[in-house]
Amino acid sequence: MAKESSEKTIRVGGNEITLVTAGSGRPLLVLHDELGYTGLLEWQRALAKEYTLLIPLAPGFGRSPRIDWIDGVRDLGSVYARILREERLNDIDVIGFSFGGWLAADMIASNPSQFRRSVLVAPGGIRAPGGEIMDVFQVPAQKYIDASVVDPARTPEFAKLYGEPTPERYEALEDARAEFARLAWQPYFYNPSLPHLLEGIPDQKVLLLWGTQDRVVPRSAIEAYHKSLAGSKLVVFENCGHRPEIEKTEQFVNEVKQFLAA
Amino acid sequence: MHMMWFTERAYHYDPEVEPEKYRELENQILKLRSFYGTPNRFFDPEHGAKVLNQYLDEKVYTDQELLNFDGVMLNEHHGTPFCLGSVMDVEAAVLAAKTRRVRIVLLGNPVATVANPLRLSEELAMIDLISNGRLVSGWVRGAGSEQFANNTNPALNRELFEEGVEFIVKAWTTPGPFRYEGKRFHFRQVNPWVLPLQKPHPPFWIPGLISPDTADWCARNRYPYVALATKLEPTMELWDIYGKAAARAGYQAGPENFGYLQPVMVNDNQERAEELGKRILFGGSFAHFARPEWMFPPGYNSKEATRRLARLDAGGNVAGRPAHGTGGDETEEQIEAVKREVYATYPRMLEDMQMIAGTPSNVIPKLKKILDVLRPGIFSFWLDGPVSHKDRLRCLTLLNNEVIPALREYGHKLELVSPFQVAPGSRPLARESAYEPVGNAEALSA
């Protein structure tokens, strides 16, 4: 059996970024969440049948070395945009999760023609007008992971998230949290300008996915995204938390495939 | 030797006067497993005013009546009944005006969380002027919880700390006005009108809990390092890290480079002293300073420290490692059981000299042993726990009248010079290999 995924190192502007790739077909950029790359899960395997998943491991989030001058989401998005430019990955699709969703949205705001189609899964990045985004920094990483699904016991792949519970996993999660603090400590997990930057961008093909029991990103934040991104499609999963990709895998994969195929 | 004393200025009640309030606060802390984050509905401003003034009065009394003390030491914590000194410079300013003699030793100012080093340089310069040059400044990164209390980005703490201290020195020593453009701090016009009296600036002493990074930084900068009641063996190891870094920088470290903080409780009666000393364990003491998630915020620790932490056994009386689990829904009975566990550690504390409690004649030999082992030029007594103002004053009086004279004589014999007698970093060393340890390993095993 061929290896499910492979890794390579991309050089950009004197820096090295680890890129995980899986599957074959049209390239699909996958932007991981605030705790780093989760590891290869069922939803990725399902999409890998039709797409080449390109999963960059963000600098400082454990594997790719930190880039000293990166001081915010815009800086990181610019590094990714440069990679896409230099790798000639024009007209690519993107799917971003939580922090990765914010990053994708920021890249759209910077360059509206950056992506062909974009899927934002429970994205942070916009202040929730009616609530607060859960503070990852005030709880141990595992508590945050626990809170990210409705019921860990009934989420088949929950135990596989971010790998085995070893000292190495603790270190990787702490690396991710430290880098995320550099990017999003204050204002916490949003950019006050983002709704305004997104407003008025024409012809964006954006799918917003959100679970009704999401304890990390409140409904009002996803509605603010929906309002700013005219023409975006909002799909809400019932009885689902912050991770529809593992809590409602089948529905999730169907929605994403359908949207990207259009 | 420089002899001083310190207290956290905890907010608490005397169990002999207000047992119910004492119990209520302690149970709340045990329930949260944390002093930090105790809801401030437990704060009574009238009681706060009373105890805060008592703490100030004790220091003024030290200045006027307890002439064997050379200094008083302050620190700063936020959002916690552990310490009422949330803006230490305010207390220091009061003491600068109300005292005439003692050194005012600030260990230390949390540069990163204050977030405006220019303002800090001005506050400290004013304290130095008002006290007529009696300020000793110190710098800290601040406990993990301070990053939350002040909303300081913990991942930037080390950068803010190092740049902040460097900037303050520059603001005090470089003629203004000048523009400052650093990485984290920017000032259009640096020209503080009020400058410190001491030149080139007040002495810096740095407190720490055995961080090799800090010891190395202190040695390179010739700042004395004050170990905060850490166990003798690891403290000796740290002295060695400092000493070797000093040798690399071309000097032989001496007692003037080291300080030590020791919890004590002295009383006329041995039994009473031990009973009062036990109260330092109130609320679980340092093990419950703050919950682990507040103690170790993201990016606050270096990668190396995180690596060590990832492999650390979860037990033990380490700061931020609660003495019990992380439940939160315990019954009163369960909390009482936790309390018994907390206080059951007391005999071990006495044995390890993490608390030295007794009559003057009983504590003197133990304190001499510490001087023998660590050979510090700076020594601070640490009085804490819910003990009445009267008992605290008695302790201070006995320290002054009986303990300090004995220790001073002994320190003289051991040539324990303070940074005011021998400038730290002033003993040239011809070769790095000629370095001699300051601590006395033989005395440790004796």
Image (spheres, helix red, strand yellow):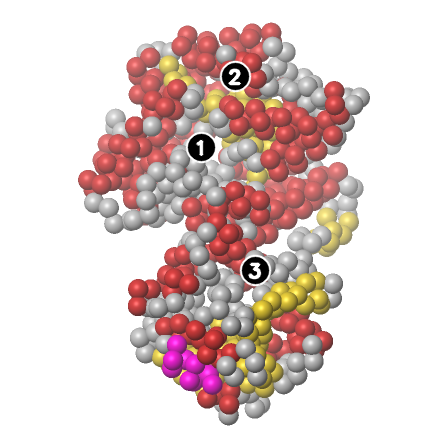
Name the residue rendered at 56%, 58% in the picture.
A62
Which amino acid type corresponds to the residue marked 2 in the rendered image? Leu
The subunit carrying tag 3 is: A
Relative image position of residue A40 (x, y in whole percent): 48, 69
* Residue, disc 3: A61
Residue at numbered disc 1: B8
Badge 3 and badge 2 in a common chain: no
- Give the Cα separation between the discs numbered 3 and 1: 38 Å
Q: Which mark is residue B236?
A: none
Q: Position of residue B225 (x, y in %)?
A: 60, 29
Q: Amino acid at mark 1?
A: Glu
Residue occupied by mark 2: B444
Secondary structure of the residue carrying tag 3 is loop
Q: Distance from label 3 to label 2 (Cα)?
A: 44 Å
| Residue A40 located left or right of residue B112 | left
The secondary element bearing badge 1 is classed as: loop
Rendered position, B112 above or below B267 = below
Subunit ID for the residue under disc 2: B
Is B221 inside the magenta-drawn segment?
Answer: no
Q: Are marks 3 and 1 in contact (CB under 8 Å)?
A: no
Residue B252 visible within the image:
yes
Read off the magenta span: A249-257
Using the image, determine if residue B427 lies above or below residue A261: above
